[in-house]
Image (cartoon, rainbow, N blue to C red):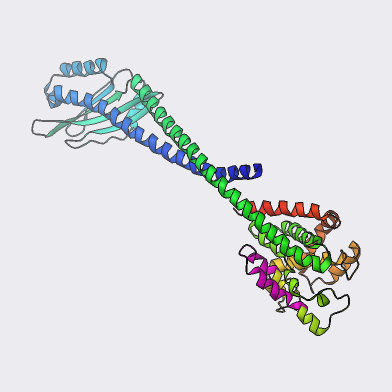
Amino acid sequence: MNIIKWHVHRIILVRIVPAWILLSLFFGIFTYEMETIRINKFVFGLASDAVEDFNKNVGVEFYALSYDRQEEILQNILHKGQFVGISIYDKNRVLNSEHWYRADENLISKIKDSNKYFPIAGEHRHEIVKYGDDLYVMAIAPLKYSKGIVGGYFEGAYKVPSLAVFEMNDRIYESLATVLVALFVSGFIFYSVVFSLYKKSSILSSDLLESNLDLMEVLGSAIAKRDSDTDAHNYRVTLYSVMLAESLQVPKGEMISLISGAFLHDVGKIGIPDAILLKPGKLTIDEFEVMKSHVYIGQHILEKSKWLKGAQEIVSCHHERFDGKGYPNGLQGEYIPFKARLFSIVDVFDALTSVRPYKNEMSYADAVKVMLEEGGKSFDVLILGKFLEIAPSAYAKINKASVDILRGELESKLRFYAARTD
């Protein structure tokens, strides 16, 4: 149960956490952008109000005032308001007057370097300039006569109050935190619901796997009992196959069909008479034809199970030879399915190195000699070469192991690869 629980946690985390991260990034960026737009509107509003006050109280009449009066008005605006700089342009956009207050040379240079665009009547132009921890808005608005004719332009560099900047930043952080907390809480709730459902599904899947494993063992054992008095052969060749496939880096998704095919490779022998199946001497031509029919019988048996259908590749072709002299279809070379080429090597190796009712076991060294002689004939040379690399350790681990140990090892492998196909 604990294995199932942690497996479910792993599956859900692998699938949900990336989605949660993407959603957090998306909504975080979206919230930040929305708050930035809202804050920009607020900031522009502050600057616009200040510009409108000038337009309303002075406006285009500014040009008719004396120089001293103009200076007085501009200095009054700078000292009493949030403006740090004011520039007045005539209708031809020629600078008429410029004044700065509470602004150092670097700030003045940065504001002046901003793109200057003179709006038409009825428009305002704003641009935010960030300088250190402070925010400034460079705003330009036309000064209009009563009939709406533009008589000049007012440009003001407006400093956003520090308290407003602090509140704006605080609002952004609060909004982001709210979104992230909401996503976390909803993700946790969703995780809990999915975990509960997935756990139930995994338990059912585990039970189904258990049933399929039992079915595979029953079928494999049924013929093994008839053929060799023990089903250890099925476990050995299957574990040899897994070890060889792992060394060849066979995709994990292919391992279940490899395991079932290896374990059930001779299931069709259940339909072969004992007189032929257990005959100690050489079979006659007719008897051998009957023996070869176990391939078709095995195919027919496996068609009844969807889960075992993937085993047909090995069941159908593990008696094919690399030189094309095998049966049932005389396939040659790479026309023989890869898993069948792989399995035929371990099947012959285990047959040579184990006891059967009609033969004694062969030593490891003698078995290797026979295997090498059959390279390019019965076996794919490349796969055989890889098998001979792992054969010493595989043989030491598997050949004399008890059925209980072999069964435990195989069930562990089966569960491992079944989990990887979820």
Q: Is residue 110 above or below residue 30?
A: above
Q: Is residue 308 magenta?
A: yes
Q: Residue at x 86, y 56 (%)?
A: 400
* Residue bounds of the magenta highlight: 291-314
Horizontal arrangement in the rendering, residue 381 relative to residue 208 (left or right)? right
Q: Residue at x 31, y 32 (%)?
A: 38
Q: Is residue 202 above or below residue 109?
A: below
Residue placed most toward the observer, 87 or 326: 326
Q: Position of residue 410 (x, y in %)?
A: 74, 55
Occupied quadrant, residue 114: top left
Residue 339 showing in the rendered view: yes
Q: Position of residue 422 (x, y in %)?
A: 59, 53
Q: Position of residue 348 (x, y in %)?
A: 81, 68
Report the quarter where the N terminus lies: top right
Q: Is residue 235 above or below residue 158?
A: below
Horizontal arrangement in the rendering, residue 344 relative to residue 112 (left or right)? right
Residue placed most toward the observer, 49 or 349: 349
Magenta stretch: helix, strand or loop mostly: helix
Occupied quadrant, residue 237: bottom right
Residue placed most toward the observer, 86 or 216: 216
Residue 105 showing in the rendered view: no
Q: Is residue 126 magenta?
A: no
Q: Residue at x 26, y 36 (%)?
A: 117
Occupied quadrant, residue 330: bottom right
Q: Position of residue 134 (x, y in %)?
A: 37, 23
Q: How many marks?
A: 0
**Residue farthest left in this picture:** 147
